[in-house]
Each structure stands twice: as structure tokens, then as C-alpha cells.
Image (cartoon, helix red, strand yellow):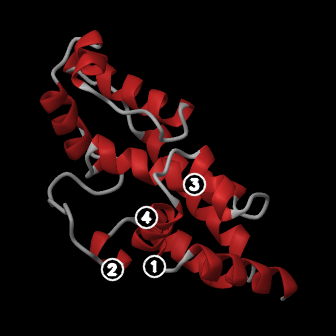
Amino acid sequence: MRQVFIPVQVEHTEQILSWADLSIPSLTQLEITLRNEPDFHSKIQLVELWLLKQLEQQIIDYSQGQAPLHCAIQSIHQSHGQLSLSEKWAAEQGVSSRHLRRLFLHNLGMTPKQYSDVVRLQSCIQLIDHQGLNALYQSHDYCDESHLIRQFKKFTGVTPRNFINMSVLSKLN
């Protein structure tokens, strides 16, 4: 079995690494493509396509107990990251929440909650040009606008307003 993004022989959980440190040829090619792409939205789409391709290449071996992971990932995407994978949900899949967490950590390098947060934020980013922040936090189940801003800054390094400004600037260029 191999992990989706990082070779199995190296453990990279909760670390910041350079792309070159990972020695993944397709990632090196993605970096070259991104450098030559002037449009910000196109860069986001290229990264999303690369990530989806990596997920598609992952062979899910149902005989090795990967079916719950596949179901969890599908459920998280269908709910746009707003699904809470509770003990009850895990039990319905025939596994404990602890085992599901281990599957996520082993295969994706993050917990189900972290993965849900990433998917929820991706959903917000897709709608950020069309909705105000107030509508975004309400429609994506954030407690309040400051919660959305904190999560946004945690994953992107910028506030939603700065992200929108960068997006507008890239459209002008």
C-alpha cells in the first residue's frame, strides 16, 4: 500500500517541507507549470487537478480495510466538508472512529476533521467571488465570520479580503 501524496518510506506528518524534499516527479513538473502560469485562478485549478489525479492513482484495496476510508472521503466531499464523522457514523461503517482516524493519518497524512476543514474551505474559495463573507460563513456552517477568517488564514496564509484582492488583481493582469 502507498500513501496518496508522499512516498511510504518517509513519515511527513505536521511538517513543512519543500517540494524538492519529496522527490515526486509529477510534483516537480507541477511546480514548473505553476511558475509559467500567470493567472492565479488557473494556478489553483492546476493544483486541484494534480491533487485529484493523485487521489485517482491511489488504489483503494477493500480487502485491506480501506472501504471505510473511501466512504468517509466521499461523504465529506458530498457534504462540502460539513460532515462530522462521529462514533455513530464510524460504527455504521463497521469500524471505530479511532481506526478511521488511523486510516486517514496513514493514507492522507491528516485527521478526518482536518480533511473536512480543507474540503469546507475549498468549497468557500469556489464561492468567494459570488457571495459575501457573511453569506459564506452561514452557508458553510462556521460559527461566525471571525471563525471563517481564522480558518481561511490558517490554510491560505491570507485573510479572505486579501485573497479576494489578489484574485481581482490577477484578473486585471
* Mark 2, residue position: 18
Q: Is residue 102 above or below residue 49?
A: above
* Mark 3, residue position: 137
Using the rendered view, name the quadrant where residue 116 is placed: top left
Q: CA separation, marks 2 and 1?
A: 16 Å
Categorize mark 4 by other alpha carbons within 10 Å: few (<14), some (14-19), many (20+).
Answer: some
* Mark 1, residue position: 157
Which numbered disc flags the more N-terminal residue, 1 or 3? 3
Q: Is residue 85 above or below residue 135?
A: above
Q: Is residue 49 visible?
A: no
* Mark 4, residue position: 151
| x then y, percent, for residue 54 | 46, 48
Q: Quadrant of the N terminus?
A: top left
Seen from the viewer's position, the closer of residues 107 and 125 is: 125
**What is the three-letter code of the residue carrying label 1?**
Gly
Which numbered disc flags the more N-terminal residue, 3 or 4? 3
**What is the three-letter code of the residue carrying label 3?**
Tyr
Seen from the viewer's position, the closer of residues 43 and 94 is: 94
Which numbered disc flags the more N-terminal residue, 2 or 1? 2
Q: CA separation, marks 2 and 3?
A: 32 Å
